[in-house]
Image: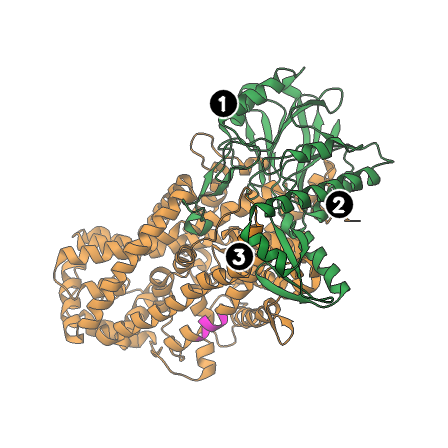
Chain colours: A green, B orange
Amino acid sequence: MTKLFFATDIHGSDICWSKFLNAGKFYGADVLLLGGDMTGKAVVPVIHQGGKNYRVTLLEQVFDISNDDELQDMIKRVRSRGYYPYLTDPDEIAELEKSPEKVSQIFSHEVLKVIQQWMDLADKKLDSSDMKVYCCPGNDDMAEVDELVRSSRRVILAEGQVTPLDGVHEMIASGWSNRTPWDTHREEDEDQLRVRYEAMISKLKDPRNAVFNIHVPPYKSSLDEAPELDKDLRPKMAGQALKPVGSIAVRKVIEETQPLLGLHGHIHEGRGASRIGKTLCINPGSMYEQGTLLGAIVVLGKNKIENYVLTTG
Amino acid sequence: MSNLFVRKATGLVRSWSVMDAFIYAFFSINLITLGLYSFSQMYYFEGGMVNALIISAIFIFFEVIVYAGLIAVMPRSGGDYVWQSRILGGAVGFILAVTGWWFILWLWVPLYGDMFRHIVVVPLLGILGAKDVALWFAGTQNGAFTASLITLAIVSIFIALGMKTYARIQKFSFYGGVLGLLIVIVLLLTGSNAAFKAGLDANAVSMFGTQPGVYDATVALGIDAGAITPFSGGALLAVFLVLPYMVFFNLWPNWGATLYGEVRGATDFKRNVAGMGWALGITTLLGILLLYAISKTIGWDFYVQAGAAWWNYAWGYVTEVPALPVWPYPALLAAFLTTNKVLQFIVVVLMSLWWFGWSGTVFLSSTRVIFAAAFDRLLPEKVAEVNERTGTPVNALLLMVIPSVFIAYMFNYNVANFQSLTLASTLVIAVTFLGTTIAAIILPYRKPALYKASPIAKYNVFGIPLITVAGVIFGGFLVFLLYQWIFDPNGLYGIGITNTSSIIYMLSMYVLAAVIYFGFKSYRKRAGIDMDKVQAEIPVE
């Protein structure tokens, strides 16, 4: 039997990454799997006001900082929500407002800097461990993230691969999703997704004992219920109106292949487990901005799931 | 945060409409169903109805701040269950969530059914000329039980249709219902007491076959029943003693709050406060306006006496059918001011939308809690199964429907004095809210890092976090309510320690929840899952 721990959508949260690396020991897992969307959603300018004074607007609240301790505390606070603090001054802010394209360069730099720090931390923390750690970046993660994961000694990039988890179970993995309203880094049409998945499935030795680690959940699986949006990306009915937004291609390949397990993310509100035929599909959800690592422990047996539980760490 | 520094990423949505949040909260503290139903039962208080409406709304505004604050700190997390689990522990979170959001809703089903027959079925049948069927629904236990069963069928259909469709039904019902209420208020404000007396006598005879002189006979019955509640005024203590009954109506502006979506900043916190707060404020003002309009034309004393006459009979204190043999529904009484049957029909149909736009909420919240507990392996996986063809959570629905049928039977046939349990429906949820309020009070101290990095970190009152201050005020209010309900020193509410059925019923729910929690925890442990560890925080270092 193999005990795996799966978490996903940690969106730049240092706390969640540290917890993920510690989860193997904490839960007694043999394998750690991180689903997609490792990177954060926003840069928070920390604007120098002269001397040791800085001004920060976090979550629409203005904080004035007057010493180094407060500055470090604020940087930690910003990082705890998965945002990237960026030390700057009023002149640069004025310049960035005139040329927004420079902001995306800053964004890439900050995102990749943190991913590099994460890989370094993983290499250091797991150096003396035989824990297997796999990452599969998601649709929100830029392509450069893959290179940094590849460069890690301890973290294995699983995207597009068939990976043996033990003597019985293999895993296919992909962070690509169906189209979203946000036109993110890794999304494509359903037929292209299907081709992508089938290329991996065709290489499986025993598809019925496989794990499908696919970021986007299957369509209409109840793991893909997200607030319905209007044309301005505003939630309808105050977020009460939910609709399925998962991938039809994922659903089709699961229905046809009937793997042992599907591991998904993408929809943070979609925490839960459901069955598609004999396949157990799990979306542990995400509360990264609270520094809480939602996850799933699954014990894989031959031809069956021995046990599973969703965790709140 | 400037949009300049936010990149395109999945789930980055704009703020939801305050109006949409307002509609959901507005229907949760439903003036026509919960409001008029409870007002009619509150005939024996010395405190003024309007004073109680205003004072309760002031306290409940602090509930709005507590819930909006928790949503800001821990958004999209699943509400009371998760907030309490993470701050107060898994056992407290589970027991208070399943009792307050699941088990007690079984008792709400016959109450929803009772309102369904009084607000929808009986008035419509009366106007359509089906006198005997109307009276069967209004005045027999079989009729009441049938109304409960129809209610169960309707809300089950709402569940099967899904939240997306029901949200649309709700929005349509909001506009239709408000239009109906405006017509009712205009009818009442432009009518006269003499016209009402004449209309009542004429319509009660033609629709329900009563004897002439309904008005005077109802006044006499109401006086005999002890109808005294004033429109306004009364000593402060007397007004406060009305509050434990009043909150049956307005304790719920937070009902849909847990799904209000991603909170990106302080603005979203204010939007949450605005959505729920405006609903509370406008409902309170509408309530005062409606009561004033009733007072002007129907007559306040008659309104209270009619309620007293009906409930004195319905609760079994007298056996003789009242002169007006149906619940004194103010919308129907207002419709008596016109002889135009079509207008009467339109008014009652539009006012029925208040029930249809609200009733679905009875099971929607319950199914969420059942699912959350199943995903935490505290219930069998089967209960969270969804029918692939229809998308209906069949097993979760059965866990609601089957016990509800049993409780509806007990209530409608008054087995073991179950009809006296109306306010127990509110007490158990208030206990759940108290658990959440305590979690809110201590949140900034138990989870300082989480709180400091939240959109409400800068909201303080004399240096004390606003969520803590609001929690203490609302928590104090809840403690007052619980004291009055449980110890009932003035014998006003009938669900406390002197009512054995009530105490046994409520305690048995907590015992059942504890048995499920500790039973499943033990079962999972034997299967190798340590539930304490599953809920515990992973060390960061």
Does B59 appear in magenta? yes
Determine the CA span between mark 3 and mark 2.
Answer: 47 Å
**Of the pair B223 and B199, the residue shown nearer to us:** B199
From the top left corner, tell me how far across and down residue B2 is, in percent: 55, 55
Q: Residue at x 28, y 77 (%)?
A: B301
Element type where label 2 sits in the image: helix
- Check disc 1: other Cα within 10 Å, few if <14, some if 14-19, many if 20+: few
Determine the CA span between mark 1 and mark 2.
Answer: 37 Å
Element type where label 3 sits in the image: helix
Is residue B112 found left or right of A52 in the rendered image?
A: left
Residue that badge 3 annotates = B505
Q: Do discs 3 and 1 belong to a common subunit?
A: no
Q: Do discs 3 and 2 belong to a common subunit?
A: no
Amino acid type, residue under disc 1 in the picture:
Asp
Residue that badge 1 annotates = A191
Is residue B17 found left or right of A71 in the rendered image?
A: left
Determine the CA span between mark 3 and mark 1.
Answer: 56 Å
Question: Reading the chain from its start, which is encountered first: label 1 or label 2?
Answer: 2
Q: Nearer the viewer, mark 3 or mark 1?
A: 1
Q: Give the range drawn in magenta.
A: B55-60
From the top left corner, tell me how far across and down residue B340 is, in percent: 12, 59
Amino acid type, residue under disc 2 in the picture:
Ser
The answer, for residue A19, to whether it is visible in the render is: yes
